[in-house]
Image (tube, rainbow, N blue to C red):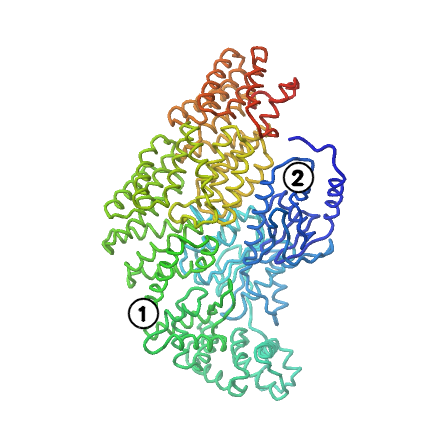
Amino acid sequence: MPSRDDQSPDETAAGAARDALERPQYVFGPFRLVPRQRLLLGGEGPAPIGSRAFDILTLLAARAGEVVSKEELLRHAWPNTFVEDDNLRVHVAALRRVLSAAAPGMTFIATEIGRGYRFVAPVRVAPPDEPPATHTPPNLPSDLGVIGRADDIAAVARHLTRARLVTIVGAGGVGKTTVAAAAARRAAALGQPVAFVDFSTVGDPQLAPVAIAAALGAATYPNALDAAVAALRHRPGLLLLDGCEHLAHAVAVAADRLYRQVPDARILATSRAPLGLAQEHVFRLEPLASPAPGAALRPQDALAFSAVELFVTRANERNGYAFAADDAPVVADICRLLDGIPLAIELAAARAIALDLPTIRASVAESLSLLAHGPRSAPLRQQTMTATLDWSYSLLSDAEARILRSVSVFAGYFSSDDAIAVAADAQLSPADVAAGIAGLTAKSLVASSVRDGALRHRLLESTRVYATGRLETAGEDRDCARRHARHLLVVFEQAEEEWNSRPTRDWSASYAARIDDLRKALGWAFAPEGDAELGLRLTSAAIPLWDALSLAGESRSHVARALTVFESGACRDGAIEAKLRASHAWGLTLEETLAPEIEGAWERCIDLARRNGNADIQLRAFWGLIYHLIYTGRPAEAFPPLDGFAEVAAREDAAALPDGERLRALAEFQTGDLHAAHRRIEALARADQPASPRVKLGRFHFDRTVAIHSTHSLTLWLMGFPDRAARAAAHSVDTALSIDHGVSVSNSLVASALLVALWRGAVDEADDYLALLGDTVRRTDIWIWRPLARTLAAWAVTERGGTEAIDALRASIADLEKARFLIRVPFYRSVLAEALAASGDLVEAQATIAAAEAGVAAQREAWCRPEVLRVAGVVRMRSGDRDGAAALFARAMADAEAMGARSWQLRIAIAMTELDPRSGGLDRLDRCCRRFDEGFSTRDLSRARALLAGTGSGARDAGS
């Protein structure tokens, strides 16, 4: 790339400003930007952003509220280097995604059309030596002011420095989560990454590793525990496992493996009983200190006991209660009767105004007396919390009690409409239910908060367990579970309808939080006492959610179970079967191997949908079959199903025609019909209207705009338009990031953006794309992109002239072949062969390029044949066979000219010139260069101009 040796005064000033920006820190939202250490600290520790994105964010934060021009941002992030505006747009889009992930709903960077960008969030400038605030995960329980636990928190923190696995053990409601969360905040304040796993909504032990992997930001498929190990190794810190008792064995297995395989990590667990691991340090958390019976206490004496302090503080916060001298002995008795259990004390404190203190004391004493005849060996929670909740429950009206029992069916947050759906009946009107929820909230039995702009409710875990027991005792559990599942079916059928029209991000915000309730409802529906047909319909309706969240592994598991049940005769609805079979086939496509039976699965879907007259499923199945054929290196076989897709779409669903045309262009590109592919995709790109409603991702899995511009970038580069290709690829990535759809982001990167960047020689840009790909792949369940990401990363190393990645490139190509993911494998083999030749290993280089030539012929991937022949010529040239090299270069040039692939022609002309500049090589190279009217900073054109200028001796050898 040309340098800017003669900097303007503005550029010099920009450099000085950049140095000045290195000093202060910038605090905004949950983030702290530390330029001196080049760190962006967020809710979970350091945020994953590249160096260019960091420079952009630093300048925007330093100039918060001002419009910073694109030109200034480019000078700041890419000093002394010319780059296109699209590079800036890609990095700003990536920044927005990282920032919004930690602070949903907040806007940080605004686009000023035609001018630049403006940082719109409030920013506090902090001195460089100010210690960072606690950076904790957003789902860590809130710090509401911890009382009476300072010594316990300090002790846990000390134990974590000596033992890498600490379990806080104690009775229910004693404050295990509170102490653990406070210890985690201490660790975060010291710069340690913290991940929080809340097991309260996980009922299935098999999902324990999934929850851990998800909290670590890792994929959950094919092996969640493997992914968790890899993620914790990638960023070791403190892993907080909260509420392990009902999943003790599964959590113990996971914790043991994480402990053994990630020596730099710390694990803090909370449970009613130890996990039973040899390396575990158990910290028993005792109740808060309470006064002895009958003690004569002044207020200041009573407040010296942490249990009394907690009661008085919470009663004051909740009700404005003022602690009087006469109250001291009564409050002391209440706290003692409640055994110093913080949750019980907080529940009692919430009633300090509605009921006088003597009444509260009498009620607590009466309720506890009910347990006097029970076994003293019973767990403390059953001796104290049950009594406390019994007392709170006894204060409810019949309507409130029924509502509390009913809403215990929800695994997580629920709305008032959700509560009405499970609780309203002939005796309780919707208005009664809404009023009852308000009453339960006032009595601290329901916790309410605003989430995503709407009021949501949730039961504390102890309350939910208690209310579930009451539900079962009342014999209402089966009916309530059925109501819950039916309500979720209504919700997800509505979601399925909205998937066609609502923006993906908005849709996900509305429905993603339902995932735990979905799991619970499906668990009940497929249980012996459940409703299998209801479970089948719910599974079918929930497929878009799993697709939107990229939960491929979970989707496949649920769909496979549903198909087994369907085949047993539980349902005869052909539409349900068709949707399940289409989803199952796609799930197989994302597994470790593109097995031969996938083709049959798609063909069965097509036949089933045809017999049932279901055009939508026919289109999905044709789409899946076409992709399978292209993925497995058989693009020429894709044209018959492409014709089938076009026929159904033209007859039944014209809105899908562009998707078929885009796939046809991809097949034409792969088979070397470059002119046809380019004409087709160019027309689609011109007609694409990103602002119009998109075809649902649940049908064709990739966003249409993303897919069109991704394919367009390939034809543009090969046709000789490298700058337009880069812009199309950047637009594809930018669009995928804007809708925050992991599958589309990854596909845009591996299918085009990284290829175009590396072809252009823009290795720094490729590194940024690789960083984004790594982050995205870690969050998705798509196994096949992992070896592909390794292939592309190794290729990037070879583009810098390095040979150290040859082993990795060879291994990743072998993994692709083993998985039968054969698309572009012949081309990747040519990259490997060229790297081997450059390293001097001509024997393996010859064998590798021969395998590439055979692959091109077998797979009919003619698009890369000129490049494979060129590399074959380079290997011959390095072996001393100049005549053989010349013959191969001539074949390559004839092939590239027939195809119209100007970029291949340029590379071949460079190789021919470096082999023999005297035999018309320079003239031929000059003619090739003159066909380009853009891309002058790309590696190939720069090398060509150097050769033409007579300075080619310093350039690297042909094709290396």
Quickly name the residue at label 2: 78
Choose between 226 and 756: the one closer to the eye.
756
The quarter of the image holding the N terminus is top right
Q: Position of residue 636 (x, y in %)?
A: 35, 30
Q: Is residue 132 above or below residue 751?
A: below
Q: Amino acid at mark 2?
A: Trp
Q: Position of residue 163 (x, y in %)?
A: 58, 55
> Disc 2 to disc 1, how far (Cα)?
64 Å
Quickly name the residue at label 1: 479
Choose between 723 and 545: the one closer to the eye.
723
Task: Report which quarter residue 412 is drawn in.
Answer: bottom left
Q: Amino acid at mark 1?
A: Asp
Mark closer to the observer (2, 1): 2
Q: Residues within 10 Å of mark 1 (few under 14, many from 20)?
A: few
Choose between 571 and 435: the one closer to the eye.
435
Q: Residues within 10 Å of mark 2 (few under 14, many from 20)?
A: some
